[in-house]
Image (tube, rainbow, N blue to C red):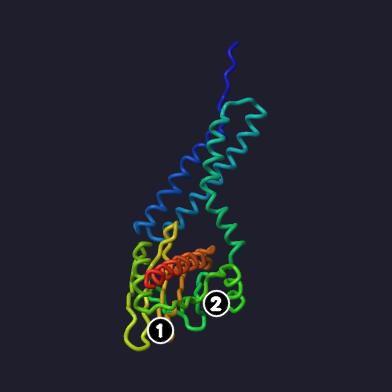
Amino acid sequence: MRVILRTSKWAKWARRCASFAVPLSILPVLLHRNQMLPSEAFEILLGLAILMALLAVFCGIAAYFRIWQTGDHGWGKASFGIFFGLLCLSPIGYGIYAGAKYPIVNDVTTNYASPLFLVAKPVEELSEVSREDQVQIQVAFPGVVTRTYTMPAPGVFALLEKMVAARGWDVRVQRAPGVGERPGQINALAMTFMGWRDEVVLRVEKAGQDSKVDMRSVSLNGGGDLGTNGKRIEAFLLDLDILVSEELEQAQ
């Protein structure tokens, strides 16, 4: 007598859900990054992708138990669903990790006493960063501090222009340092991996014979940035330190 082994229905659904979750996790991000999908629709699709990924993992685990008990086929399909379901959920895992590691803020700057003005978002729409949050930001991002260089402001501003262009940021305001005490400033939009836009502001002003650089990075969406703004400022200013040092060495 021929024994017919069935394929677990749980395993089939695990693969189906994962096959739907993968493109639903990738395509909206690509469209959002290219501004072909509004943020509201992106959030809905992202939530749907998370739901499908969770279903894929759940069905895959249920299939494992079912197959173990009945001897049905479907190990491969169940494993496919669990693997790709967890892969689609990995950004959520990182978000939980970053949310626990970094302070829940969306506005980071080197100078809270004299904030750099924004052009993409009115000031009244931003929540004020409390003194407690400022202390947490300083602990989490020790490199977010005002820079002072023994280099004229126009020279530093030229370096900032090159660095902003190299990063592909969308410049909205660019004003070189003027005569007297007028500072130079650059306002630009930077894009996160998921396609969200953040505004970055750079200010260069004369400080005696030296020049002083301040930087601000603000998320235009959401209440927490998962450390994005602080890490962006630290990385940018560290690169600026290196470039200024090289310029000064060549001038000697």
Q: Position of residue 166 (x, y in %)?
A: 36, 62
Q: Judge from the rendering whether residue 73 lies leftward or rightward of residue 124; answer left or right.
A: right
- Of the residues shown, which amino acid type is indicated by label 1? Lys
- Of the residues shown, which amino acid type is indicated by label 2? Val
Q: Position of residue 57 (x, y in %)?
A: 57, 42
Could you tell me how far apart the alpha carbons at marks 1 and 2 are, in whole angstroms?
A: 27 Å
Tell me which residue sits at (41%, 70%) in the image.
Answer: 249
The answer to which quarter of the image holds residue 179 is bottom left
The answer to which quarter of the image holds residue 211 is bottom left
Q: Secondary structure at mark 2?
A: loop
> Which image quadrant: the C terminus?
bottom left
Tell me which residue sits at (49%, 49%) in the image.
Answer: 49
Q: Judge from the rendering whether residue 126 lies leftward or rightward of residue 120; answer left or right.
A: right
Choose between 209 and 169: the one closer to the eye: 209
Q: Position of residue 19 (x, y in %)?
A: 47, 40
Q: Residues within 10 Å of mark 2 (few under 14, many from 20)?
A: few
Choose between 172 and 142: the one closer to the eye: 142
Residue sitting at the far bottom: 180
Q: Secondary structure at mark 1?
A: strand
Tell me which residue sits at (43%, 69%) in the image.
Answer: 245
State if disc 2 and disc 1 touch (CB < 8 Å): no
> Which image quadrant: the N terminus?
top right
Tell me which residue sits at (44%, 57%) in the image.
Answer: 193
The answer to which quarter of the image holds residue 58 is top right
The residue singled out by tag 2 in the image is 129
The residue singled out by tag 1 in the image is 206
Q: Position of residue 131 (x, y in %)?
A: 60, 79
Q: Residues within 10 Å of mark 1 (few under 14, many from 20)?
A: many
Camera-nearest label, 1 or 2: 1
Residue sitting at the far front: 252
